[in-house]
Amino acid sequence: MVINSMIVALEACSKSCSKTLIYHIGSSLRNPFRISDLEDLAHQYFTKHPLTDMNGKPVAVPEKVTWMSGVSSFHRYVNIRYMLALKGVKVMNKVCCYGHEAFYNESKEKVKKMMGILRLYKPYLLFEGIFDDKNAENLRMRKMKGKDDDDVGRFNFDPTTIDWTHYMLNAHIPGLVRYGVK
């Protein structure tokens, strides 16, 4: 959608429309996706497709995840849930004369991957802004006037056409599991 909007904006600007307009492309106003939506869809996905533990057994999905209200509670949660647990495994490994080195290294790698995912999503998880996309919407409406349906569909950048449920359950979460978590 961003590429389509850039193509349409370039075309419009080449035809002498105002070059000072900013076209914000996003869904926060017309088709928002909230953290509560992610919670519900992640719960739905992992209930149907649970991750497995080191023994190949399904990992139980908690009934409801409570998300942080701000950056400080986010850091507190990550430190308690992941970093403290990893330090505990490290101490256990030392006490047991490094007899659990493989478990520690595997746990450390999992925490490292999880921290990378958390760093990637942190700005989006805690952000509650709504962006004004009226310039993009006006551009989209101008594009629709006088064009055939094929051209409008080819350069679609209407955020209301995003099916968040389909995207999250069939592309985003499976992609994270396949390429980011394992």
Image (cartoon, grey):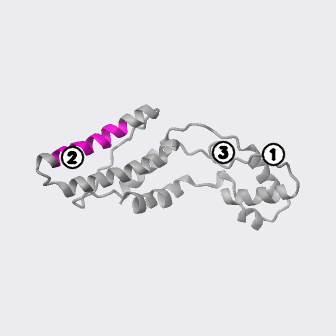
Residue 36 % position (x, y): 48, 41
| Labelled disc at residue 20 | 1
| Mark 1 element type | loop
Q: Which residue is mark 2?
A: 89
At 41% from the left and 55% from the top, the residue drawn is 45
| Mark 3 element type | loop
Q: Residues within 10 Å of mark 3 (few under 14, many from 20)?
A: some
- What amino acid does circle 2 point to? Val
Q: Who comes first in sequence, dot 2 or dot 1?
A: 1
The N terminus sits in image quarter? bottom right
Residue 82 % position (x, y): 31, 43
- What amino acid does circle 3 point to? Arg
- What amino acid does circle 1 point to? Thr
Q: Which residue is mark 3?
A: 30
At 71% from the left and 44% from the top, the residue drawn is 133
At 87% from the left and 58% from the top, the residue drawn is 15
| Labelled disc at residue 68 | none
| Mark 2 element type | helix
Q: Label 1 vs label 3: CA separation?
A: 23 Å
